[in-house]
Each structure stands twice: as C-alpha cells, then as structure tokens.
Image (cartoon, coloured by chain):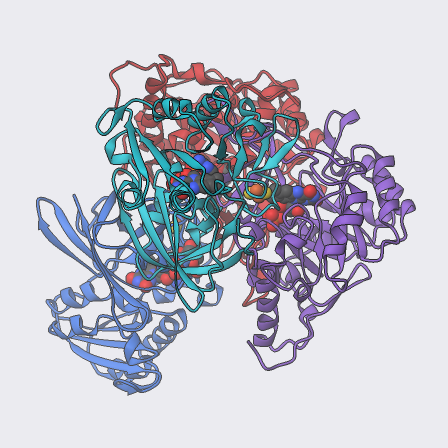
Chain colours: A blue, B cyan, C purple, D red
Amino acid sequence: MTTALPIRSEATVLENCAEGGENVRLRLEVEAWPGSAPGQFVMLSPGAFRGTDSVDPLLPRPMAVYRGTPTGHGAAVVEVLYKATGRGTRLLAAARPGEQVRLVGPLGRGFVLPDPGVGSVLVGGGTGVASLFELARLAAERGSVRVLLGARSADDLMGREDFETLDVALGLATEDGGEGHRGLVTELLEPVLAEPGELAVYACGPTPMMQRAAELAAAAGRSCSVSLENHMACGFGVCLGCAVPLAGGGFDLVCRDGPVLEASAVAWEGLP
Amino acid sequence: MTTALPIRSEATVLENCAEGGENVRLRLEVEAWPGSAPGQFVMLSPGAFRGTDSVDPLLPRPMAVYRGTPTGHGAAVVEVLYKATGRGTRLLAAARPGEQVRLVGPLGRGFVLPDPGVGSVLVGGGTGVASLFELARLAAERGSVRVLLGARSADDLMGREDFETLDVALGLATEDGGEGHRGLVTELLEPVLAEPGELAVYACGPTPMMQRAAELAAAAGRSCSVSLENHMACGFGVCLGCAVPLAGGGFDLVCRDGPVLEASAVAWEGLP
Amino acid sequence: MSSLPIDTSVDFAGIRLVNPVMTASGTFGYGSEFIPFFDLRRIGGIVAKSLTLEPRTGNPPPRIAETPAGMLNAIGLENVGVDAFVSEKLPLLPPELPVIASVFETEIDRYAEVCKRLTGVPQVAGLEINASCPHVKSGGIEYGQNPQLLARLVSATRRATPAPLIIKLSPNVTSIAEMARVCAGEGADGLALINTLQALDVDLETLRPVLRNGLGGLSGPAIRPVALRMVWQAAQAVDLPICGIGGIGSAEDAAKFLVCGATAIQVGTANYLNPRAPVEIAEGLAAFAATRGLPRLRDLVGTLEGLGSS
Amino acid sequence: MSSLPIDTSVDFAGIRLVNPVMTASGTFGYGSEFIPFFDLRRIGGIVAKSLTLEPRTGNPPPRIAETPAGMLNAIGLENVGVDAFVSEKLPLLPPELPVIASVFETEIDRYAEVCKRLTGVPQVAGLEINASCPHVKSGGIEYGQNPQLLARLVSATRRATPAPLIIKLSPNVTSIAEMARVCAGEGADGLALINTLQALDVDLETLRPVLRNGLGGLSGPAIRPVALRMVWQAAQAVDLPICGIGGIGSAEDAAKFLVCGATAIQVGTANYLNPRAPVEIAEGLAAFAATRGLPRLRDLVGTLEGLGSS
Ligand SMILES: Cc1cc2nc3c(=O)[nH]c(=O)nc-3n(C[C@H](O)[C@H](O)[C@H](O)COP(=O)(O)OP(=O)(O)OC[C@H]3O[C@@H](n4cnc5c(N)ncnc54)[C@H](O)[C@@H]3O)c2cc1C
Ligand SMILES: Cc1cc2nc3c(=O)[nH]c(=O)nc-3n(C[C@H](O)[C@H](O)[C@H](O)COP(=O)(O)OP(=O)(O)OC[C@H]3O[C@@H](n4cnc5c(N)ncnc54)[C@H](O)[C@@H]3O)c2cc1C
Ligand SMILES: Cc1cc2nc3c(=O)[nH]c(=O)nc-3n(C[C@H](O)[C@H](O)[C@H](O)COP(=O)(O)O)c2cc1C
Ligand SMILES: Cc1cc2nc3c(=O)[nH]c(=O)nc-3n(C[C@H](O)[C@H](O)[C@H](O)COP(=O)(O)O)c2cc1C
Ligand code: FES
Ligand code: FES
C-alpha cells in the first residue's frame, strides 16, 4: 500500500462524458500527483468551478480513483467513474473540458493485494465497481482473478469494457436480466467461494451487497475486504464525520482507517 | 408604454457569447413572451440552471431587455447584454446553449418615447447602453436621434455594431481614448444640449454619469429621463428592497415606479 | 401528478385552508402583485406585508443584500397603513382567498388599535402579530426577545380581537420553547416561526455595513435548519398549531416542516426567485402525499421519530 | 503579492501570532493532519479538537449532513483525551506553532481538571473553553446559554489556570453581549465566537432527523452574517480581545471580522473543502492590507463605521 501524502490541487477537466445510464467518466489532469494505491479515493469539490465561488452545494464528494496514469513530470491523468444523481454529482457532470475542479487526495487505506500466487475474487455493485479496477489489474499480476460486476440494468454497468481488457475472468449480473446472470451479483459469488484453495475476497458496492458478500465469505470460512461508503466532510480524518461502528465496539473512520476494512470488524447493523 | 403582465418562464439559452472585454451577449428563447417596452427589464436566476438546484448565489439579477424579437406562436428571442463581473453574472456566463435560465418579466416602467417630430439624444455608459437600443430604434421613428455611447475602453463598448445598423447618429467616447472622443461621454452631450429646439434627453449608465447628464440637461433648461439601478430581490414591487430616495421626500421603487424616472425627481445624494 | 384524490386541506388556528401553503409577510406584497403569476386561490392563504396604524416610509437604501444561500434585509416599517390596506388592497384579492393581516407597531396600544381596525373586516381570516419589532424603551430589544414584553403584547392583542390570533416569533432567543409557552398562556390561537435571524455584513470598500440601517434580518435557505429546529422545539413545548417559516423553496422543504410539527407553512424569500413558488410547492405537497400513499396531507404533521423532546 | 512589508502580527489574549489566522476546534484535527498541505508555521496558530479528561468515543453515524451553504454536525465528545493529546499529538507539531487547547466537559470540576493538566505544557499557548457543552443537570441547556452557569464555568477555569483563557461562546442566546460581559467579569482573557447554531434537518424517507443524534450544529458560510453580527455586538460590549469564527472561507471574509472588532479569526468548515484555506487566507489578508496601504494589518481591527452601538 502506498503511503503517498495527499495533495490539494486544482485539477483540469480533460473529459467528462456520459457512459451508460447516469454514469459519467471524468478524466482529470493533476500536477504533482503522488500516485495512489488501489481502493484509495479523492475528494472533489463540485462548487469550486464554473467561474464562480458558489458555496452550495458546499461539501466535496468522495470518489474512488478508478485509474491513475502518469503522464510525465510528476503529472498524471486521474480517472473517476461516477453516477450523477444528487446535487453535487449533477453539478460535477456539468464541468466541461478546460474547467477546474478542486481535488484532495489520494486518501484512505486501500486494498491489500493478495499474496503472490493467490487467486482473488472481486465483487462490485453499482458505483462500487469504480474502486476495483486498479485492484483487478494488480491482483492479476499475483494470481488468477475473477471479477463479478452487478448493476440494476445493462446500462448501469460501470467500466465493463475496461475490465474486458484485463487478464481477468469477468462475470456479470443484472437485476433485470438485461446482461449476464439475472439477479444479484452475490449469487455469482457463492459457487466461487466453494472452490477449494486460498482465495482473496474483495467487495465494494451497496451496503446490503457487501454485507451479503461478507456473510457468504464467512460461511465459506474466508475473510473478506470491503470498501465502505459514508458521508464525509473532509476525507482525511479531521471532521470525525465518517465514523463506522465496529463489531468490537467503538468506531473507525472510513476516510482514515478505511475505506477498506475487514468485513468481520464492522458492526453492519449500525451502518447509516 | 406597454402594460404587458409579466410572466415567469424557464427560458432556453440559444447563445451566450463573449463580446468585447467582460461583455456577454445572451440570447434566450422565451415562450409566451408578451413583448416589452424600451427600458423594461427581466430578472434572471443564475442559480436555477446547470442541472442543479444550487441556492448560491441566491437572488435573480436584473437585466435590461436589449432587444425582443417575436418568433411566432407568441414566442420571442429575448436578448440581454451584460458584463460578467460578480458571482451571479459569471455563473450566468457559464450557461451553454440548450440550458435553461429562469426569467421573470417584462418588469418596470420603461422610457416614454419622444412626441412625433421631436428629436432625441440618448447617453449610454457601461452596461447602461443595453437599456437604450430599443429606445433608439423606436425614437428614430419619431424624429432624429443621436446616440452617445461611453466606456472605459474600446473593448468595453457594448452593442456598437447594432446601433450602427439603426438610423441614428452615433457618437463614441472612451476614457482611454482608444475609440472616439477621449474622455467622458457626457462631454459629448454638452454641445448637443445647447442646440436650439425641443429635444428629449435620456441617460442610462453609472450613477455619476447619469447625475452629470441630468445636471447638464437642467442647466440647458431641459428635463432628462434616467434609468436607475439598485439592488433588487424580486423586481416586481414586493420586497421593497430597491427604494430610491426622492427629491421631494419618501421613496420610489426602482423596479415598480422605475427603472426610468425623471432625473429631477431623484435625490441623487441619497443613492447607494 | 397523481390519480389518488388527496385531501390537502388543513385547519390552522381556526382558519380553513385548501392546503397548508401560505406566503410570508413582507415577501408577498399585498398579494395582488402575484396575480399575473398564478391563481391565488390555489394556495392556502396569504399573509400581507406588516401593517402599522399610519402609512409609514422605510429605511434609506441599500435595504437588501445577498449572502451565502440567503439575503439580508432592513426595509423598515414601510407599508400603506392599516386603513389603505382595507380600503385599497384587500378589494384586489379574490374573495375566497384567506388573508391574514400582519401587524407591526412600536407601542403595545398601537398594536392593539391596528388589531381592532382589522377585526370584522370580511376578508381578514386572521391576524398575525409580528413580535420582531424593536421595543424602543427597552433599548431596542425585540418584543419577541423578552418573555414579559411578549406576554404583554399577546395579552393586549388578544383583548383587542376575537379573530384568530397568530403570534410570529423572533428566532433571536435562547429558548423558543419559553416564548411559545408565553403565547399559549396568554391565549394565542397559533404560532408562526421563524422571522429573520439578526445579522450583519460589511462592505470592505466603505468599511460600513452593507445595509444602510446597519443590522439586518437573514432569510432564505441558509436559515432553514435553524427554523426546522425551532419549529420542532415549539411544537414539543405547546399544543398550539404552528405555521413553519424559514427558507422553504420546495415541496420537500415544506414537508420537513410538517413532519416537525407545523400544521401550515409560509413561503418567503423563495417568492422573489420564483413568483410561482407557492403554487408549485402546494402541487408538490399533494404529489408527495400521493407518492407516500397518504390520503390526507395533514397526517404528515408531527410524524418525526427518533428525537426525544427537549 | 505585494512589495510593501506588511506587519501581519497580532497579540491575542497575550498570545503573539504571526498573523491573525487560526483554525477552529474540531475542524483541524490535532493539527498534524494538515502538515501535507502547508507549513503550519505560516498561520497564526491552531486550536485543536476539544479535549476531555478521559478519551471519549462519539455518536453513532450519521454524524454530518450537508445543508444550503452549510453543514450540520453532531460528532459527540470524541477525542483522544487530554493526556494522549499532550504525549502523542503535541510532539507532532512544529515547536514554534502556537497551539490553543480546547476544553470540553460535562461537569465544571472536570473542565477545571483538564485545564490544570494543560497548564505549563510548553507548547500550549492558551486554553479555549468550549461553553457549548450541554449541562445535563439543567435539562441539556448549554453552559453558554445560561449566564449563571457560564459565570461558574469561567470562574472555575480561571482559578484552575494562569494560562491565557479564552471562552468560546454559544450563539444560541438572546444576548451575546450579556454572555460576553459575564466572561469579562470572571476574568477571561479573550472570547472566541461563534460556535455552531443549533439546528435540525429531516430525512423524508425515514421521517427521522438526518443525524442520528437528532439535533446538530450548523456551520459554514450560511452562518457568517450571524457570526459577524455577534462579533460586533460582543466587541461593543466588552474590552476583551475577540477571535471571530463562522463561515470564513476567504481573506475578504476574514477582513470583515477584523473590521467588526475581532483581533484574530478561526477558519472552520472551510478546512474540509480546502485544506490550504488557512494559509491562503493569511496570504490574502497580507495582500489586502497592502492594497489598502495599511502597514499593519491590525489597524483594520474595529474600524467599522456607520453602526451605532446596541
Ligand atoms: C470512499 C468513497 C468512494 C466513493 N467512490 C465513488 C465512485 O467512485 N463513484 C461514485 O459514483 N460514487 C462514489 N462514492 C459515492 C459518492 O461519494 C456519492 O455518491 C456522492 O457523494 C453523492 O453526492 P451527490 O451530490 O450525488 O448526492 P447528494 O444527495 O447531493 O449528497 C448530499 C451529501 O451526502 C453525501 N452522500 C450522499 N450519498 C453518499 C454516498 N453514497 N457515499 C458518501 N457520501 C454520500 C454527499 O457527499 C453530500 O455530502 C464513494 C463514496 C466513498 C465514501
Ligand atoms: C433595471 C436594471 C437593469 C439592468 N440592466 C443591465 C444590463 O442590461 N446589463 C448589465 O450588465 N447589467 C445590468 N444591470 C446591472 C446588473 O443587474 C448587475 O450588474 C448585476 O446584478 C450584478 O450581479 P453580479 O452577480 O455580477 O454581482 P454580485 O456582486 O455577485 O452581486 C451581488 C448582489 O448585488 C446586486 N448588484 C450588484 N451590482 C448591481 C447593480 N449594478 N445593479 C443592481 N444590482 C446589483 C446583485 O443583483 C446581487 O443581488 C441592471 C440593473 C438594473 C437594476
Ligand atoms: C425583504 C423582507 C421583508 C420582510 N418583511 C416582513 C414583515 O413586514 N413582517 C414580518 O412578519 N416578516 C417579514 N419578513 C420575514 C419573513 O416573513 C420570513 O419570516 C423570513 O423571511 C423567513 O422566511 P424565508 O427564509 O422563507 O424568507 C420579511 C422578510 C424579507 C426577506
Ligand atoms: C464537524 C465539526 C466539529 C466541531 N467540533 C468542535 C469542537 O470539538 N469544539 C469546538 O469548540 N467547536 C467545534 N466545532 C465548531 C467550530 O469550531 C466552529 O466554531 C464552527 O464550525 C463555526 O465556524 P465555521 O462556520 O467556520 O465552521 C465543530 C464544527 C464542526 C463542523
Ligand atoms: S471524512 Fe472527515 S474524518 Fe472522515
Ligand atoms: S426589487 Fe423588490 S420591490 Fe423592487
């Protein structure tokens, strides 16, 4: 895991294009980008652009680094896949190439890669898919990787074409059956967990999906790394806003101690 | 003067293009536009677009109707010339064709046209020029019209090309001398006022300019119609925010009793 | 927006409203200014600009300024006076429309006199007492900031009129619950809250307040979370019906006030941005009730869970 | 940004700051979290998260929510405790940086004990007493909402420490001037204001408060006009130096607080949006003074004209 210190940067929008459904792919040019580990995230300020210093919406939005590509001289293209649903993300979707968006990152603790030789299974649902791309790429250098992606409909499936370019086995599930398995993506997970041998299990997506993945993993005697979401103001451990209750009592901060946590450590019933 | 009732409309941006300096020309398609009299204005809400319901900046911005062109079926293209300097106007300048801007109007009492056969002189400074175009066009049907436009520099001069298409005599003044007379536009006014015969005098621009025009007109024994600016929340007489003190005591509302007032009625020293 | 027939009507302080949406005093003129924008009979009622005994002129400009998600105002007492309101302004309004007259004065006996003049006027459905007026003798403190002053004001206006009496509270207090209880004790029929938060902004060019008056009142979306808190606290403290005010711009905003215990709401600053806001909020509330399967909108009132009374 | 050498230093309650920009408690962690973003020595000082005697855990989530131009929070008392702060957090900070420790407790004797433990710690330049803690025995009213409680708190902490003692006031009061006078009377060295406005927002899906705790504190640009008003009122009421807080996000915002009478300011919520905000504001203030031809930034303090005292 990288220990790169975060930066604050006024990043330049290179591209901000609709993918399927409400999904948008944002490519940002960031100077002096220190690189990020899979599962780390950035905070993006939607109000800090469009030629005005609007303070509504006020808070920056946490977004996984989908992919970071160095472009030389320390700069990089940081890519984010997001769903434009709320006030902030809809405003973000209005940013045009050449405009600036304030970025703080890389933040949080990402995924621990599987030991060399160990295979892995990655379960992604909805926008959670965005946290898994770098993990899939790097895990494939360690062992065989299965990626299971789920969404409501084929349109909503994020980043599928990118995953197809990786050396991973891809399984798809949609709730309406428009693509791949009809049903929940966790239904694809169960048989994989039953296979013999060591296996690293990772999940990112809606809370019920992660909780179900963790239950299935536990039933199969396996641990499971989950990447949690929570409302955030700062993203770097100073507002104490993103507390998640722990099974053993007390709280972790999603932004500082996570977003990736061991599923068994989390008090799932206490999540917001 | 028209007595058309105002409407509230979600107007569609057709064009929003930089002119010289910080000046922007906005063309809006408005359904069921009732038409407007010269000198009337609209309220435009910069926060009510860009795919988000942002409430900062909150208040709509008063803008003169530069020109309204019916396009059939009651619709019209309403044109506005504005300077993008503050938070709201900069946000407005970011609106792209196809986006919507909330519009309320036409509002206020505009200019009273000169009697048929009577000539007129129109003095415009800075963004005040935008209030004068329709007046110049209609006054030219009544008598000979001189239009005197002033700005800091040639770049800042608004709408000059449009005035050149009218049957009016155009005089220009810039403070830096980059175009026309070097100095204040009111310096061009003085000799005109000295000419014999009836003459309707109109002024719109920065307060010191209008006050000076009014003084010169009074010294020449002539009255002068000025179009005032003031901070506004509503634009149609309900917030009582836009009060302007009168020479005879008490207040008029710029949005309801103006924006066009007789210069001698105004207590200039009490203007904000 | 829905096929379910929703009963949106409410009874507020003895006044029947076709829906809970009213308009806030000082933000809706005398009502007729909005006739070009929508049919006023489609909202519950209106509250007119606060009235004094005599016509009054207001403060010199600037009177308003924009702030983050809000605005400041110091208009002063400007209004046409109670008599001109009755003779010139009321006749311009549709007769079916419930009109609440707002009363604003410097002395308690003048408050009472304005109430008397409005009592029995056919279209006046109720009186709203604006308690945010500074009491000059107490060093400019608002009537609504001092429990003893407020009690005297409520009791005097109560004696002056049998009409539905609504007290509009100032939010510039340590305990809104205490002020609500004072009103209940003196016989008020309902409460309206909140008025504006006392505030200040500075012009760095002139090193003077942005408003000529100096201090002003903060309104708009910025204050909505404070208003929701106070409405909930007042609703916990007394049994009086409450009209919720403060930063309401959408049906969702309005619904939150109902959930916190308001029977009706008033739309204020939003009228400036969108003169059709009240009717759009009324329609949106009906649609909201339909979506939730609530046949009566008023069943939403006071349904907040998870917050112990305090 | 300018060639004029501007003296930006101020003396606040006996603490010398290189410039008037500090950071607000609870919005700047324990300070070291910001080391990646800027050199902390470039701002006047920092105020750390409020400390209790023992380490404490906070409220269950959700703890924060966005509001128009603002945010709500109800974090609870979560902090590492005074001893861990001294032994683990302070050593991470540059030794030249003035650090003000914020103190937050449920009982007055515990407040005093925390003050004692912080007294004499080399890097602790002063103590800030957070008076927005609910006093459980008085039904949850904040210390800062009741003059008698506040007087007892100030006098007890004053006796506990000779260190510069700053009282951070609650804005949820009828008269901030009264509270300021209480602090002056009990020997405080300075005031800090405002803390958050008590507020509420509702989740219409669940019909519950958006925060698990129920009520929360409103901060951010939305509250700035209220904060400016209170800072001005407190500055009129007492001779104590004042640290202005509330919605400061730019040098212009900060300058307005100075003009209203604040000697120093604290940056709060803005740290979340822009972790470089404090240093950018400090630079901007120097540039502002240069533009105005002010050789000493502190000459701006209390220069507001056109507003009679009230
Ligand atoms: C570590 C992390 C990584 C994330 N990565 C991605 C990603 O790669 N792609 C993506 O589409 N989404 C991602 N999310 C979720 C994303 O942050 C939210 O969808 C977004 O904040 C919602 O903002 P809005 O303006 O659409 O909604 P609004 O309803 O306007 O949001 C209001 C407030 O609630 C917060 N909020 C609402 N929903 C969420 C949520 N699910 N998680 C956290 N805060 C929320 C907002 O940040 C804001 O403060 C991530 C969240 C976290 C915590
Ligand atoms: C009747 C009328 C017609 C106008 N016509 C035009 C026009 O055709 N073209 C043009 O460029 N400008 C025009 N103006 C001026 C225009 O309204 C202001 O420039 C604009 O409101 C400034 O907004 P901002 O977001 O740039 O500034 P900000 O500084 O963000 O404004 C803050 C607040 O102050 C108000 N304000 C600031 N300056 C002015 C001003 N000069 N007049 C009124 N309110 C102000 C804003 O409306 C807003 O409420 C007109 C003004 C009036 C009253
Ligand atoms: C310009 C303006 C003038 C106002 N005048 C009055 C008034 O005369 N009487 C009154 O009771 N309230 C008055 N108010 C307060 C509003 O009625 C309302 O209580 C307050 O603005 C909060 O609601 P809002 O945030 O929806 O605007 C006024 C508000 C504004 C903005
Ligand atoms: C998440 C959060 C936590 C806070 N915690 C504290 C605290 O522990 N002690 C304290 O005195 N103030 C605390 N505050 C209040 C701030 O210090 C500040 O007074 C307030 O937020 C207003 O300033 P702002 O608008 O710049 O944020 C907190 C504020 C926020 C937003
Ligand atoms: S988001 Fe601020 S502490 Fe985690
Ligand atoms: S702008 Fe509201 S009355 Fe003129």
Q: Residue at x 45, y 51 (%)?
A: B45
Nearer to us in this view, B138 or B225: B138
Q: Quadrant of residue B157?
A: top left
User: Which quadrant is home to the N terminus of chain C?
Assistant: bottom right
**Residue drawn where x is 62% and y is 46% of the image:** B238
> Closest to the observer: D26 or C238?
C238
Identify the residue at image location x=58%, y=43%: B256
- Counting from the top left corner in percent of width and height, residue A240 is at 43, 48
Q: Nearer the viewer, residue D190 or C218?
A: C218
**Percent position (x, y) of residue B200?**
46, 34
Q: Is residue D197 left or right of residue C128?
A: left
User: In the orientation shown, which residue stands out farthest toward the right?
Assistant: C159
Tell me residue B31's x, y (percent): 44, 64
Q: Eyeballing the image, is D236 above or below A177?
A: above
Identified at 38% across, 29% down, the residue is: D251
Q: Is residue D303 left or right of residue A5?
A: right
Say above or below: A228 vs B67: below
**Residue C100 location, x and y as percent?**
76, 53
Name above or below for residue A84 compared with residue C60. below
Residue C285: image quadrant is bottom right
Is residue D171 visible in the rendered image? The answer is no
Residue B144 shows in this picture? yes
Q: Does residue C184 lie above or below B223 as drawn?
A: below
